[in-house]
Image: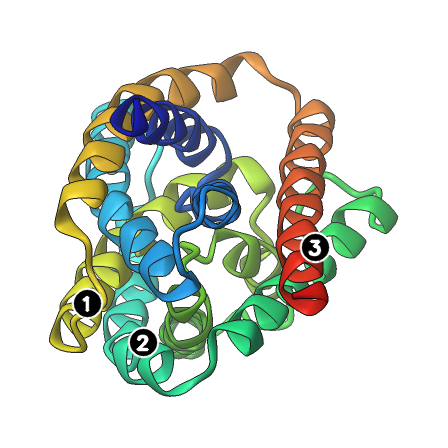
Amino acid sequence: MQEGIFALIGFISGIAAGFFGIGGGVIIVPCLLFFGISMEYAIGTSIVQMIFSSVFGSILNIWRKKLDLRAGFYVGLGGLIGASFSGIIVANIHSTILLILFILLTLVSVKKYIFNTKTTANPNPPIKDPTQQKLVMIGIGALTGIFAISLGIGGGLIIGPLLAYFLGLDSKKVVPIALFFIVFASISGSLSLYNQDLIDWHKGLIVGICAMIGVAIGSKLIDLTSLTNHRYALIGIYVFSLCASLYKLFLILVE
């Protein structure tokens, strides 16, 4: 029964990964918390799942010629560096604090997508020099890897706004880059968490394998969706994650 629930969570998170360019952690972490998994192991399971969904999704994006490999490489390189610190962070910060940080990060994303009605890229990006663009992409990847992977999420919700502002990319172009970034960050993060004994490989494999099926569906759905509807759907995902996380925090505080 429990395996079936994990499989369903993986499938749904995979659809979200392919459709939104996120790791699926905004779905997986709150759901696992709801079923009694600790914050630390929910993060570990989420990161393992991301390896499957991001690799499979990126292969599909390369095959369909949607991915800018140059941008993906530099953002991914930064993620590889930043995520290597995630195990130390998760092992040394209390789970309630991690949950509060997760909620705050989700709140920032919800605010951005609700009050920013633009669905197109920044027409006047501040960074135009190629060398500076590479450094900015590495920096964005590193910062995202440190904070996002440590909270069990892929970082698409952080990368999207930053790439849109600094490089002038719209949300549909950012999705494949964000998913490719997660390949690097999730592998680095999993190794870091494994060294701290914070990985449940059994749950992670179930969720991850089922997520690959969802990714194929999600990456196809994005072709059928307008930028406006894509933004509304993303808002819905964040609101769900926020409500589930707030509920878990409420249960902790009233204990």
- Percent x, y of residue 236: 70, 33
Mark 3 is surrounded, within 10 Å at the Cα level, by few (under 14), some (14 to 19) or many (20 or more) other residues, namely: some
* Separation of residues labelled 3 and 2 (CA atoms): 23 Å
Viewer-side label of 3, 1: 3
- Percent x, y of residue 74: 29, 66
Q: Which quadrant is home to the C terminus?
A: bottom right
Q: Residue at x 26, y 77 (%)?
A: 87
* Separation of residues labelled 2 and 1 (CA atoms): 9 Å
Dot 2 and dot 1 residues touching (CB under 8 Å): yes
Q: Earlier in the sequence, mark 3 or mark 2?
A: 2
Dividing the picture into quadrants, the one containing residue 83 is: bottom left
Dividing the picture into quadrants, the one containing residue 163 is: bottom right
Dot 3 and dot 2 residues touching (CB under 8 Å): no
Q: Earlier in the sequence, mark 3 or mark 1?
A: 1
* Separation of residues labelled 3 and 1 (CA atoms): 29 Å
Q: Amino acid at mark 3?
A: Leu
Q: Residue at x 63, y 36 (%)?
A: 237
SS at mark 2 in the image: helix
Q: Residue at x 27, y 36 (%)?
A: 53
Viewer-side label of 2, 1: 2
Q: Residue furthest front?
A: 255
- From this view, report whether residue 211 is shown above or below residue 82: above
Q: In the image, is 59 to the left or to the right of 221?
A: left
Q: Earlier in the sequence, mark 2 or mark 1?
A: 2
Mark 2 is surrounded, within 10 Å at the Cα level, by few (under 14), some (14 to 19) or many (20 or more) other residues, namely: many
Q: Which residue is mark 3?
A: 246
Q: Which residue is mark 2?
A: 86
Q: Residue at x 31, y 76 (%)?
A: 86
Q: Which residue is mark 1?
A: 188
Q: Amino acid at mark 1?
A: Ser
